[in-house]
Amino acid sequence: MDMLKKRKLDENGIGMLNDGINGSVSSRLMPQDARKIIERFSTDQLLDILQEAVVRHTDVLEIVRLTADSDISQRKLFIRGLAAETTTEGLRSLFSNYGDLDEAIVILDKSRLRRLMAA
C-alpha cells in the first residue's frame, strides 16, 4: 500500500481499526485514536453526533446526565415574567411536581414591589 494513502487512512481512523488478523477490522478504538478522528469536527457536528448517541444509547445518556447533574450551573432556572402575585411557596409547589428542589426563590424588582405594596 502506498505510504501516503496509509497515512491518510490512519488520520481518518480507518487504518487504526485493522487487527492485523487476516485483514479483519475491529470495532474497538483506543481513546487517543478516537480523539484523533473527532478533534477536527466543529462544535455543531459534535453536538449532532452526541445528540444521536444520547438518543440511541442509554449508557451515553447516563454519562451526560451525571455530568450535567454534577455542575450546579446546569441545574438552575431563571424564569422571567412571573405574575406580581407569584410567591416563593407557589413557585416551589409548582416545580416540586417535577422532582426535588434545592431552592426556589422569587425575587422582586423595585417596580413589582411597589405594585404589591399598593395592592
Image (cartoon, helix red, strand yellow):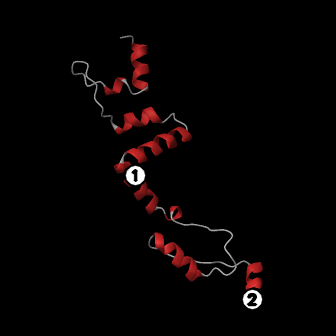
Q: Nearer the viewer, residue 4 or 93?
A: 93
Pointer 1 and pointer 2: residues touching (CB < 8 Å)? no
Residue kind at label 1, given as amino acid type:
Leu
Q: Is residue 59 above or below residue 90?
A: above
Please give the residue where the numbered disc 1 appears in the rendered image. Answer: 61
Please name the residue shown 72% across and 77% down the image. 109
Q: Is residue 19 visible?
A: yes
Q: Is residue 78 above or below residue 45?
A: below
Q: Is residue 104 visible?
A: no
Q: Nearer the viewer, residue 110 or 96?
A: 96
Name the image quarter holding the C terminus: bottom right
Q: Is residue 57 above or below residue 11?
A: below
Residue 52 in the image, given as x and y percentages of width and height: 45, 42
Sequence-first tag of 1 and 2 = 1
Q: Residues within 10 Å of mark 1 (few under 14, many from 20)?
A: some
Please name the residue shown 52% across and 35% down the image. 41
Residue 81 in the image, given as x and y percentages of width and height: 69, 70
Name the image quarter holding the N terminus: top left
Question: Which numbered marker is on residue 117?
Answer: 2
